[in-house]
Image (tube, rainbow, N blue to C red):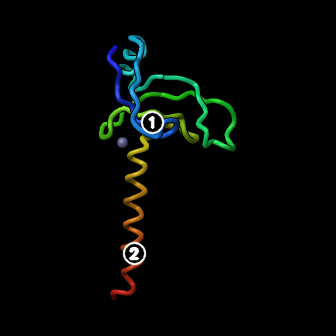
Amino acid sequence: MKPIQVYDSHFTHGVREMRLTTLQALKLKLRGEVKAFNGRPEDWTGAPGEVPFYVTKCPKHGYYLAYEAGYEKALRCPSCLQELVEASGLKGVERARAPRES
Ligand SMILES: [Zn+2]
């Protein structure tokens, strides 16, 4: 299989090339996600052992590496989360300014 470009916000903190097996590529296509490996990022100081990491695809940002987060075991796109944080930060600034302007 051709390697794919995967955004990895946990280990390499950048885009990495990943080579999937034919079976992995098929699962990714059919389910929208596939288990890539077990790992534990260095900055997870309080976390237990290794957890499974998956390759999945964001319709907006493309392939990314994720683990099952929260009670709902959701794979979350780090780029979408970053956009949410930035958007909420801007809204906070607007709210803070409003009383002084009126
Ligand atoms: Zn995204």
Q: Quick one: label 1, few (<14), some, or many (20+) residues within 10 Å?
A: some
Real-space CA distance between mark 2 and mark 1, rounded to the nearest whole angstrom: 34 Å
Tell whether circle 1 marks a residue whose Cβ is less than 8 angstroms from ligand 1. no
**Which one is nearer the viewer's eye here, 39 or 85?**
39
Image height of 30 relative to 63, above or below:
above
Residue 22 location (% of width, % of height): 38, 11
Residue pictured at 36% horizontal, 81% vertical: 98
Which residue type carries mark 2? Answer: Arg
Q: Of the numbered discs in the image, which one, if any, rests on residue 75? A: none
Q: Of the numbered discs in the image, which one, if any, rests on residue 8? A: 1
Residue pictured at 39% horizontal, 75% vertical: 95
Q: Is mark 1 on a helix, strand or loop?
A: strand
Q: Mark 2 points at which residue?
A: 95
Residue pictured at 41% horizontal, 51% vertical: 82
Q: Quick one: label 2, few (<14), some, or many (20+) residues within 10 Å?
A: few
Which residue type carries mark 1? Answer: Asp
Residue pictured at 39% horizontal, 35% vertical: 15
Quadrant, the C terminus? bottom left
Residue 93 location (% of width, % of height): 39, 72
**Which one is nearer the viewer's eye here, 52 or 16?**
16
Residue 78 location (% of width, % of height): 43, 43
Residue 99 location (% of width, % of height): 39, 84
* Left or right relative to 42: residue 90: left
Q: Which of marks 2 and 1 is in front?
A: 1
Q: Is mark 2 on a helix, strand or loop?
A: helix
Tell me where residue 68 sits by quadrant. Answer: top right
